[in-house]
Amino acid sequence: MNDSGLSRRNFLGLAAGVAGAATLAACGSSGPSSSSGSSGGAASYWSLSGPPGQPYRQAAIDRFNAANPNSKITGTFYQNDDYKQKIKTALGAGQGPTMIWGWGGGGLKSYVDGGQVLDLTDWFSQNSAVKSKLLPSTFGAATVNGKIYAMPIETVQPIVLFYNKKVFDQVGVKPPQTYEDMIALIPKFNAKGIAPFSLAGASRWTNMMWLEFMLDRNAGSDVFNNVFAGKPGSWSDPAVLDMLTKVQDLVKNKAFVNGFESVVADQNADQALLYTGKAAMMLHGSWSYGIQVANGGDFVKSGGLGWMNFPPISSGKGDPSNTVGNPGQYLSISSKAPAAAQETAKKFFSTVLVDDTEKSGWVKSGGVPVLANSDSLYTGDDAQYLKDMSSIASKAKVFAQSWDQALSPTAAETLLDNIAKLFQLQVSPQQWVDNLNGVIGK
């Protein structure tokens, strides 16, 4: 995930102020703040400050320390931007914490390439009971070159297709079952003066969600896996050109709200278009639900909001269960840490991070835990939504990480820039492919 996306894509945020929680979870409040530690097999843990995440991270540390007084964990929490800079500097100097919090993907790969984190593949094999408590789909972003280098933690956040049930009823149409059904709805909504899709195009990463799903549904996960692996020319796969052409066809056919290029996600204007009935559908992260609950009046409570996984492309090779988004947050263990501290970290992984208190805590935060079998904890008005998000995450054959998280910052910026130009019809599909091939592995 790039800097611009972090503040919007971290937590569902139902419990901690709903709309504000999604921002606070990533950006933090006032950091750093620390808990106390001790000697022996003492270990350190750096992560993000602020609600809703910090209280539950601290609670896990406190539970562990109470049970392990001779090998305590010291937690230090930073605001998002501070954390990213400090962790990079500390690891480069060989002075990083025992446990490194992150988003997996490209950031984790850089740690692996630098020999800075432990290979946990054998550890997970020897601790199958721990692995079985985690959703299998969360391990993709923890894996580099076929080996596991991080423990999935906290919450999952799939991207889903939201729709306004009231608008569908008004126009007299049904939710799409296939991509082709979705395309057939475009002229019907336009004829009624309703935008088929809301889109905050000025924010770029919102556009990216369309490419992620359309490439996966069209070609499966192998194409982007090759990009992530750094294989030269990976974007030249014919399925990519087909996907890019489909995207520009959507733009030309007025699938997106008029002036989408100027709509900014920071202001939640794209979501307002959906719940006010000015747009019929919106592809967005699961955290959008909490924002719509907070800002949409009685729209969600009255049953106006519908949701589904992105529909399959009839001729596509991708598994329709696949999803994209945030498959979790991640903890790695520093390869430079003392052996005793590494063992403390592994004990932390295998005890409190997979216990029932941890699971219920993240549900209380408004999230869907990476821990399996959480459905019984979903209660109240939001229960069905949370169960459905959990189902999408748990049933996904592949839960792909958002592209700008998976790639290096250099490649991610080129990606986002070219995605914006693609939607504005400023680059051709072939130019897009050429530009992105130029930053593979950088």
Image (tube, rainbow, N blue to C red):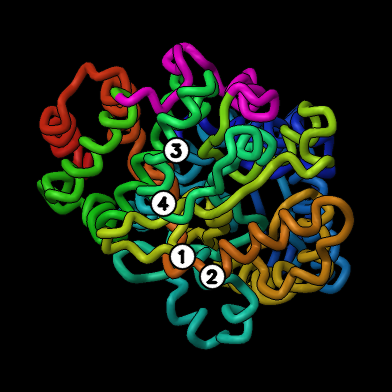
- Name the side, left or right, on which 195 lies relative to 78: left
Q: Answer few, some or many: residues within 10 Å of disc 4's Cα (few below 14, many 20 plus, some between 14 and 19).
A: many
Q: Is residue 353 above or below residue 262?
A: below
- Secondary element under disc 1, as helix, strand or loop, is loop
- Viewer-nearest of discs 2 and 4: 2
Mark 2 / mark 1, whichever is N-terminal? 1
Along the line of sight, the residue nearer the viewer: 310 or 54: 310
Residue 185 marker? 3
Name the residue rendered at 76%, 58% in the picture.
384
**Looking at the picture, how far across and down is residue 159, in whole percent?**
53, 47
- Viewer-nearest of discs 1 and 4: 1
Q: Is residue 96 above or below residue 292?
A: below
**Looking at the picture, how far across and down is residue 14, in whole percent?**
79, 43
**Looking at the picture, how far across and down is residue 82, in whole percent?**
59, 29
Q: Which residue is mark 2?
A: 395
Q: Amino acid at mark 4?
A: Gly
Q: Quadrant of residue 113?
A: bottom left
Do residues under tags 2 and 1 come within 8 Å of each other at their CB atoms?
yes
Q: Answer few, some or many: residues within 10 Å of disc 1's Cα (few below 14, many 20 plus, some between 14 and 19).
A: some
**Looking at the picture, how far across and down is residue 85, in whole percent?**
51, 32
Mark 1 / mark 4, whichever is N-terminal? 4
Q: Quadrant of residue 295?
A: top right
Q: CA distance from mark 2 to mark 1?
A: 6 Å
Q: Which residue is mark 1?
A: 321
- What span is colored magenta in the figure? 253-278
- Name the side, left or right, on which 55 lies relative to 277: right
- Can I make out residue 36 in this image? no
Q: CA distance from mark 1 to mark 3?
A: 23 Å
- Viewer-nearest of discs 4 and 3: 3
